[in-house]
Image: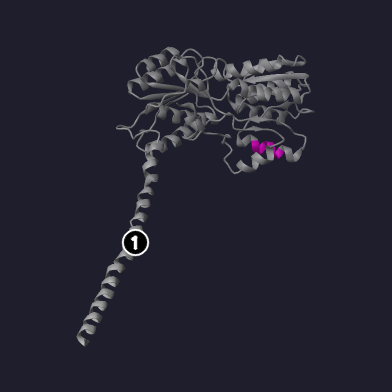
């Protein structure tokens, strides 16, 4: 009987152990089942680097592009800054391996001389030409020949109608109308004024003078008693203004362009008529410094400066690189008289209302600096499909 009890106890003990060892493993595997679930989410994290190349506009090129520059006038701060901006923007592309150094043809020359510039660039087998044209029509055949050779051609600062050529510029007519309207309103719609224009026949000057004429048509009591060219040169414009002041001692106002405005102001300061005629200014820091000094001397001193940004050249270069890499232009973004112009925004219109704010931002810049604006690579995408 005792053996039977012992046997029973042994059997019971075995059953307990069997149950213990049989059930315990059932609960333990449950925990590891959840562990593999966590790594499932980890591969999702590397998605970001996968998407980054998609945002790049194009793949790197096999061979850097060579871009030629044709500039026919070097007698102004505008053109100096224009070349500087081109070199700065191109350095970005050189660092990316997209372009070589710019091939720059820059000198004071006439239409025949600029045609020679274009021909030399074509002989150098450049991939694109960026040109600041010195004539409305005289360069068209040469530029169209370049286009036929497969060269991408963009004109800057001024608009031309050459077939296959794109323009990148501010609206020069609108630019001139802003300051022309200002001076007419500052004179309460009446008085005698003179006009100092740029180089006669240059596309920008032609567009600007059309804008001035259009404004003056709305102010019949504003009389233009004199008009002459200051050749877009400060000293020349100062001499022109000297002659006007001598011929018209009771002059009420003068309209001028760019750096010529500082020359005209200096003539007025030297002659010191009483009262001073009201005149337009320029968005260059030399003029802005003088403007600031004159405001300190006479709180009633008033003028206006509308920025003509040399940075349109840099914006054009960004577009050219996009085209060279195969991007298609959105034709619906083109404007102008020949439907081939990308109009850039006018970055600054400075008058008495915002002078202090703008001056504080740029007062430490060198006197030769023009208030500027260059589109970023992201901003030029608005012109492409």
In the image, is residue 291 part of the stretch drawn in magenta? yes
Q: What colour-coding does the image apply?
A: one colour
Q: Nearer the viewer, residue 237 or 98?
A: 98
Q: Is residue 185 left or right of residue 39?
A: right
Q: Nearer the viewer, residue 187 or 120?
A: 187
Q: Nearer the viewer, residue 247 or 100?
A: 100
Q: Quadrant of residue 119?
A: top left
Say few, some or many: other residues with alpha carbon within 10 Å of mark 1 (under 14 / 14 to 19 / 20 or more): few
Q: Which residues are magenta?
A: 288-293
Seen in the picture, residue 98 relative to 121 is either above or below; the reply is below
In the image, is residue 242 part of the stretch drawn in magenta? no
Seen in the picture, residue 228 relative to 38 is either above or below; the reply is above
Q: How far from the left and from the top, in percent, is residue 303?
A: 71, 31
**Residue pictured at 79% horizontal, 28% vertical:** 275
Per the image, the residue denoted by label 1 is 30
The C terminus sits in image quarter: top left
Q: How far from the left and from the top, in percent, is residue 358?
A: 64, 39
**Residue pictured at 36% horizontal, 15% vertical:** 148
The N terminus sits in image quarter: bottom left
Q: Is residue 369 left or right of residue 91?
A: right
Q: Residue furthest bottom?
A: 2
Q: How far from the left and from the top, in percent, is residue 302?
A: 73, 32
């Amino acid at each position: 009987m005792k053996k039977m009890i012992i046997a029973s106890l042994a059997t019971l003990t075995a059953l307990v152990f069997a149950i213990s060892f049989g059930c315990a493993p059932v609960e333990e595997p449950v925990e590891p089942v959840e562990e593999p679930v966590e790594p499932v989410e980890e591969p999702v994290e590397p998605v970001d680097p996968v998407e980054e190349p998609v945002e790049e506009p194009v793949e790197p090129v096999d061979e850097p592009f060579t871009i030629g520059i044709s500039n026919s006038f070097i007698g102004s701060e505008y053109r100096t800054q224009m070349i500087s901006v081109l070199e700065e923007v191109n350095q970005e592309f050189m660092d990316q391996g997209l372009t070589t150094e710019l091939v720059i043809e820059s000198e004071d020359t006439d239409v025949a001389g600029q045609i020679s510039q274009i021909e030399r660039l074509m002989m150098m087998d450049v991939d694109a030409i960026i040109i600041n044209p010195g004539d409305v029509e005289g360069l068209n055949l040469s530029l169209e020949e370049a286009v036929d050779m497969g060269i991408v051609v963009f004109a800057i600062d001024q608009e031309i109608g050459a077939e296959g050529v794109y323009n990148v510029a501010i609206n020069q007519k609108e630019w001139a109308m802003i300051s022309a309207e200002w001076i007419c309103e500052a004179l309460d719609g009446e008085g005698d004024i003179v006009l100092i224009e740029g180089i006669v026949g240059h596309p920008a000057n032609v567009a600007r003078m059309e804008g001035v004429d259009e404004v003056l048509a709305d102010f019949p009591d504003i009389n233009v008693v004199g008009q002459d060219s200051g050749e877009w040169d400060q000293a020349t414009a100062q001499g022109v203004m000297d002659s006007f002041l001598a011929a018209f001692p009771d002059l009420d106002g003068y309209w001028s362009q760019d750096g010529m405005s500082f020359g005209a102001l200096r003539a007025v300061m030297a002659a010191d008529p009483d009262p001073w005629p009201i005149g337009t200014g320029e968005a260059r820091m030399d003029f802005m410094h003088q403007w600031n000094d004159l405001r300190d001397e006479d709180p009633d001193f008033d003028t206006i400066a509308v920025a003509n940004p040399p940075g349109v050249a840099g914006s054009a270069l960004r577009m050219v690189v996009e085209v060279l890499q195969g991007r298609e232009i959105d034709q619906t973004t083109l404007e102008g008289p020949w439907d081939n112009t990308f109009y850039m925004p006018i970055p600054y219109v400075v008058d008495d209302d915002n002078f202090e704010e703008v001056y504080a931002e740029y007062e430490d810049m060198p006197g030769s600096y023009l208030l500027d604006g260059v589109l970023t690579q992201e901003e030029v995408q608005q012109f492409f499909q």
